[in-house]
Image (tube, rainbow, N blue to C red):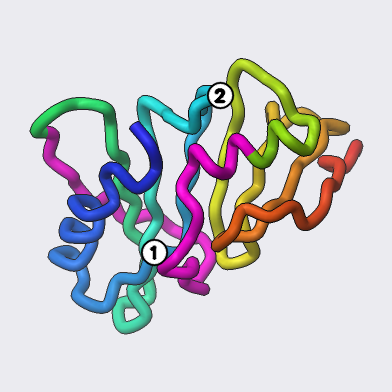
Amino acid sequence: MLFRSALEGVSEAAKAWRSDAVLTNVSAEEVGPDGTAEIWDYLFYSPSYGKYGRVSARMVAGGEFKVRETGKGPREAIPADFADSDKVIAQARWNGLNLREYILGLTSRGWAVYPSLKRGQSIIWLDARTAAYQRTEAIPKK
């Protein structure tokens, strides 16, 4: 499923958890070249509650979305008019990251696309709204 596919149901679950919940992060591992993933994780922050709620969406028809509270994450909301995952993968491939599977993450800073979390790998950063290329940076070697 594409990132936006479960957004409505996930957002409803988050609003039921805390009415002021804002989406601050989305991520998935094993994203295919078409921008689909079997599981997407959505992270919400409640300013009034001061806590985070994570909702995982799986490719299962009629699935129920449950909020699990978690300890930390970003507080800044992602833009409402963000690019969907298929456009993000297409742009990452255009910029030289041609893989069978990707890891994606979206925050207020933009989309991060990378092959793995291993040190020395490159992260391609794309604009959250347009998926336009911003920069490439290496995961630091320690």
Q: What amino acid does circle 2 point to?
A: Pro
Residue plotted at (69% across, 28% down)? 116
Judge whether residue 55 is colored magenta. no
The quarter holding residue 6 reads: top left
Say whether residue 48 is left or right of residue 120. left
The quarter holding residue 64 reads: top left
Q: Is residue 30 visible?
A: no
For the residue pair 140 and 125, the one nearer the viewer reads as: 125
Secondary structure of residue under mark 2:
loop
When the figure is inspected, residue 14 is found, relative to residue 141, above or below; the finding is below
Residue plotted at (44% across, 58% down)? 71
Say whether residue 101 is left or right of residue 24. right
Residue 1: which numbered mark, if any?
A: none
Q: What amino acid does circle 1 point to?
A: Leu
Residue that lies at the very extreme toward the right in this rendered image: 141
Say whether residue 98 is left or right of residue 24. right
Q: Is the residue marked by circle 1 packed among few (<14), some (14-19), or many (20+) residues within 10 Å? A: many
The residue indicated by pointer 2 is: 33
Dominant secondary structure of the residues highlighted in magenta in the image: loop
Q: Is residue 43 visible?
A: yes
Residues at marks 2 and 1, CA–CA distance in whole angstroms: 25 Å
Q: Is the residue marked by circle 2 packed among few (<14), some (14-19), or many (20+) residues within 10 Å? A: some
Q: What range is drawn magenta here?
A: 63-90
Residue plotted at (38% across, 76% down)? 50
For the residue pair 121 and 88, the one nearer the viewer reads as: 88
Secondary structure of residue under mark 1:
strand
The residue indicated by pointer 1 is: 23
